[in-house]
Amino acid sequence: MSVCEFADRKKSEEEPENESGILDSQHAYLERYREVSGARSAWYPAVVEAEAVFKDTARKKIEALDELVRKLIWAIETYHREQRRRVKGAQHQHLNECIYQQCENIIFGVHPGMAEAIEDKRILMMEGFRSN
């Protein structure tokens, strides 16, 4: 992430200094997501045409892409919310560490593949994203 990705973020006067980097990161990832969302909107006429021509085959691929986009925004929001909780030292229970690591893997584009060891199999979730 480069400085130009969050340079336009307006910081609140009440914003804690120790959360500034997290909020910068969240802003940058949401800006990147906005690009994905805009591309999907521009792509819509092609989607309609593909469904008309290819029927169920196109529908399945489009639904798979939509699911990935939903997972991406979920991961961005969940990861940064949990980062802020950890910085604040919140007294309430933190998000499950495995889910937190999966969110981190998704937003950073990490896909380490399938676990080899039996003890690692317990942490496999979400189509092969490994939490460690």
Image (spheres, rainbow, N blue to C red):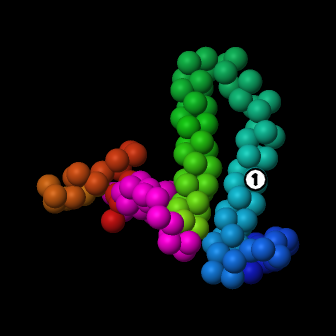
- Seen as rendered, the residue at the extreme left is 118
Residue 58: quadrant of the picture: top right
22 and 130: which one is in front? Answer: 22
Q: Position of residue 130 (x, y in %)?
A: 34, 57
Residue 108 is one of the magenta-drawn residues? yes
Instruction: Place residue 123 in its image quadrant.
Output: bottom left
Report the magenta residues as a range: 86-113
The residue at 33%/65% (across/down) is 132
Residue at image location 62% in from the left, 20% down from the top: 54
Tell me residue 34's x, y (percent): 75, 53
State the residue position of label 1.
Answer: 34
Between 108 and 92, the residue placed more toward the observer is: 92
The N terminus lies in quadrant? bottom right
Residue found farthest to the front: 91
Q: Amino acid at mark 1?
A: Arg
Percent of width and height locating residue 107: 55, 60
Residue at 77% in and 33% down? 44
> Is 76 placed left or right of 15 in the picture?
left
Tell me if residue 64 comes above or below residue 109 in the rendering.
Answer: above
Q: Is residue 86 visible?
A: yes
**Can residue 100 be seen in the rendering of this structure?**
no
Position of 37 relative to 52 (above/below): below
Residue 66 magenta-highlighted:
no
| Above or below: residue 101 compared with residue 52 | below
Residue in the image at 74% along x and 24% along y: 48
Query: Element type at marker 1?
Result: helix
